[in-house]
Amino acid sequence: MISIADKYFPSLTPFQSDQYSRLQELYSEWNEKINVISRKDIENFEINHLLHSLAIARFTVFAPGTRVIDVGTGGGLPGIPLAIMFPQVHFTLLDSIAKKIKVASAISSSLELRNVKCVAGRSEEIHDKFDFVICRAVTEMNRFVEITRHLISPSSKNLLPNGFICLKGGDLTEEMAPFGNITTITDISNWFTEPFFETKKIIYLPLLGKKNSQQSV
């Protein structure tokens, strides 16, 4: 079975295509035991969850060896789809709810993802350093930066400087105002034509963004 990932990423290997094609069934099975996706939304998994996660892979290509932490991953989104896309990148999936991490861990294992580490805990408890912090509509951005800033390494190995890459939707004017003009906000509809993405965006904030914006106010 061909997944929607093949439509937008035609250079996938057969193994990656197979992994993506299995995702909806795996999530559907686990969702019956532990609710990580809305019951009504699971039928729209490929667009609303898989493809939404992969918008980050359209925004940037992570260099081999990059370390990424998905904070508030839930059942492994956007981390797992990105881990399939970038097998040479290390992903840490973090969530404070252990049963959700159980789902992420089981799905990662089923897909033979050797570049994924699943952790039950809070961001304040993590002391490792990463190149990027990613998330999907976890919390208000100002608060999110405050509790995760310490996770980001000051040394970059990608063309894109280390920082935060977040999937959000709606009018972000007020939420992003404290960060000044150093934030990059990109419409996902630039890449994906499905109606679901009409209001969806990617926010990129370099590590020093908040500090710089405070100085300029």
Image (cartoon, helix red, strand yellow):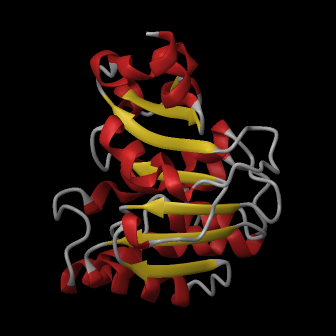
Residue 12 horizontal side relative to residue 203, left or right: right
Q: Is residue 31 above or below residue 72?
A: below
Quadrant of image for the N terminus? bottom right
Residue at 49% from the left image edge and 34% from the top image edge: 202
Residue 149 in picture, x, y percent from top left: 49, 49
Residue 90 in picture, x, y percent from top left: 68, 70
- Location of residue 76 by image quarter: bottom left
Residue 216 horizontal side relative to residue 58, left or right: left
- Is residue 192 visible in this depiction of the protein? no
Q: How many numbered dots are placed on residues in this image?
A: 0
Residue at 31% from the left image edge and 75% from the top image edge: 28
Residue 63 in picture, x, y percent from top left: 81, 54
- Is residue 202 visible in this depiction of the protein? yes
Farthest residue, direction front: 215
Residue at 40% from the left image edge and 65% from the top image edge: 123
Quadrant of image for the C terminus? top left
Foreground residue among 206 and 22: 206
Q: Is residue 59 above or below residue 39?
A: above
Residue 107 in picture, x, y percent from top left: 46, 83
Q: Is residue 43 above or below residue 112?
A: above
- Location of residue 6 by image quarter: bottom right
- Location of residue 71 by image quarter: bottom left
Residue at 73% from the left image edge and 66% from the top image edge: 89
Foreground residue among 49 and 114: 114
